[in-house]
């Protein structure tokens, strides 16, 4: 299995884990101590997904296809995907209780998911050094662009507020 295939499959797994934990958050919302935990778990998995998506974007296609991950197999992903699908189905049962949610999460977090994730990150370690250089360059570029555009705002527009445009991204 090559790095690109592994990243794509693991991104989907992290996404589904995030959704499952968000489902637990909603199902157990009457219990604040637990539902906060489930939201944090969901956010952590979404963070893993986003990290892997970013790395997939940064790693050039040739490297991603040519980099082999001998410790990972299609069968590992299939077992994990089956375990995750079964967990999602179980979670929709009316007899799915809080204890079962924790047992399910422990089973998923103790599964091959973590082995796969660690394998991908270990493989990416030397590639990641190059990616970090890319991020630093992007960050510097963003700062330069913001300064340049900020300096180009004409005096007549300096006092324009977001309410003046009639567009709201974040409703009250």
Image (cartoon, grey):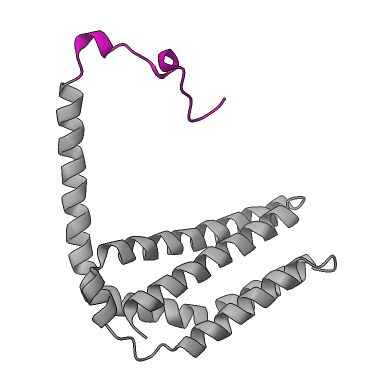
* Viewer-proximal residue among 99 and 24: 24
Number of marks drawn = 0
Does the rendering let one see residue 111?
Answer: no
38 left or right of 68 in image: right
Magenta segment boundaries in residue numbering: 153-172
- Does 141 sit above or below residue 28? above
* Viewer-proximal residue among 143 and 70: 70
* Residue at the far top in the pictured view: 156
Taking the spot 48% from the left edge, 78% from the top edge, the residue there is 114
Taking the spot 25% from the left edge, 71% from the top edge, the residue there is 61
Q: Where is residue 102 shown, x and y percent of the image?
A: 69, 70
21 left or right of 164 in image: right
* Residue at the far right in the pictured view: 95
Q: Where is residue 44 shown, x and y percent of the image?
A: 50, 60
* Viewer-proximal residue among 139 and 78: 78
123 left or right of 141 in image: right
* Viewer-proximal residue among 30 and 47: 47
* Residue 99 lies in quadrant: bottom right
79 left or right of 72 in image: right
Q: Where is residue 72 shown, x and y percent of the image?
A: 41, 87
- Does 98 sit above or below residue 108? above
Q: Quadrant of the N terminus?
A: bottom left
Magenta span contains residue 4: no
- Does 52 sit above or below residue 113? above
* Residue 157 lies in quadrant: top left
* Residue 4 lies in quadrant: bottom left
Does the rendering let one see residue 151?
Answer: yes
Taking the spot 44% from the left edge, 81% from the top edge, the residue there is 116
């Amino acid at each position: 299995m090559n790095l690109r295939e592994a990243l794509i499959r693991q991104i989907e797994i992290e996404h589904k884990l995030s959704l499952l934990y968000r489902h637990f958050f909603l199902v157990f919302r009457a219990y604040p101590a637990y539902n906060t935990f489930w939201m944090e778990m969901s956010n952590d998995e979404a963070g893993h997904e986003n990290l892997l998506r970013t790395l997939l974007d940064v790693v050039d296609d040739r490297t991603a296809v040519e980099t082999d991950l001998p410790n990972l197999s299609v069968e590992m992903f299939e077992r994990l995907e089956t375990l995750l699908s079964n967990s999602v189905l179980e979670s929709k049962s009316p007899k799915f209780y809080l204890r079962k949610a924790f047992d399910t999460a422990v089973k998923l977090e103790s599964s091959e998911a973590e082995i796969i994730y660690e394998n991908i990150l270990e493989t990416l370690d030397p590639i990641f050094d190059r990616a970090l250089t890319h991020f630093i360059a992007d960050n510097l570029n963003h700062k330069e662009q913001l300064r340049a555009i900020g300096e180009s705002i004409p005096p007549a527009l300096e006092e324009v507020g977001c309410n003046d445009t009639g567009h709201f991204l974040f409703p009250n």
